[in-house]
Image: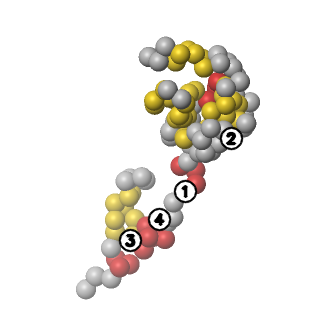
Amino acid sequence: MTTPEDEFVYDEATGEWVSAADLANSAAPEASDAVEVRDSVGNLLATGDSVTLIKDLKVKGAGQTLKRGTVIRSITLTGDSQEIDCRFDGIKGLVLRAEFVRKS
């Protein structure tokens, strides 16, 4: 008869065989997996923040220039530490580099 203490599971993260009881105890998600996105002056950005452009930016494919000082509301983080997704009038799928924005 096999007890749960006798069962082992292969942990792909560490590459080792670990007892099932130990793996269940260490299954808590880690906060270090989150990507930190910082603006041009080092402020931490979060989804839903408003940002201000610090430089005139030509938007490829839209034939439009976003002027310095333009406020972009309700940004979304993409999972990349240097890119943020946002919406602006007349431009679909606008992705900005974090180095060109400052948190409002």
Residue designated by label 4? 27
Decide: is 10 above or below 49.
below
**On the rendered structure, is 103 left or right of 72?**
right
Q: Earlier in the sequence, mark 3 or mark 2?
A: 3
Q: Is residue 38 visible?
A: no
In front of the other: 34 or 47: 47
Query: Does 5 sit above or below residue 15?
Result: below
Q: Residues within 10 Å of mark 1 (few under 14, many from 20)?
A: few
Camera-near label (4 vs 3) is 4
Residue 96 position in % (x across, y down):
56, 27
| Position of the C terminus by quadrant | top right
Per the image, the residue denoted by label 2 is 44
Residue at image point 39% right, 70% down: 19
Marks 3/2 in contact by CB < 8 Å: the verdict is no
Furthest-left residue in view?
Answer: 1
Separation (CA) of disc 3 from disc 2: 38 Å
Q: Identify the mark nearer the N-term, 4 or 3.
A: 3
CB-based contact (under 8 Å), mark 4 and mark 2: no
User: For residue 30, which numbered disc appears in the image?
Assistant: 1
* Residue 51 x %, y %: 67, 34
Q: Which of pointers 4 and 2 indicates the residue nearer the eye? A: 2
Task: For label 4, count other residues whose C-alpha is less than 10 Å away and answer few (under 14), some (14-19) or many (20+).
Answer: few
In the rendered structure, which disc, 2 or 1, sits on the residue that comes first in sequence? Answer: 1
| Coordinates of residue 52 in the picture (x, y in percent) | 69, 30
Give me the C-alpha separation between circle 4 and circle 3.
11 Å
Q: CA distance from mark 4 to mark 2?
A: 28 Å
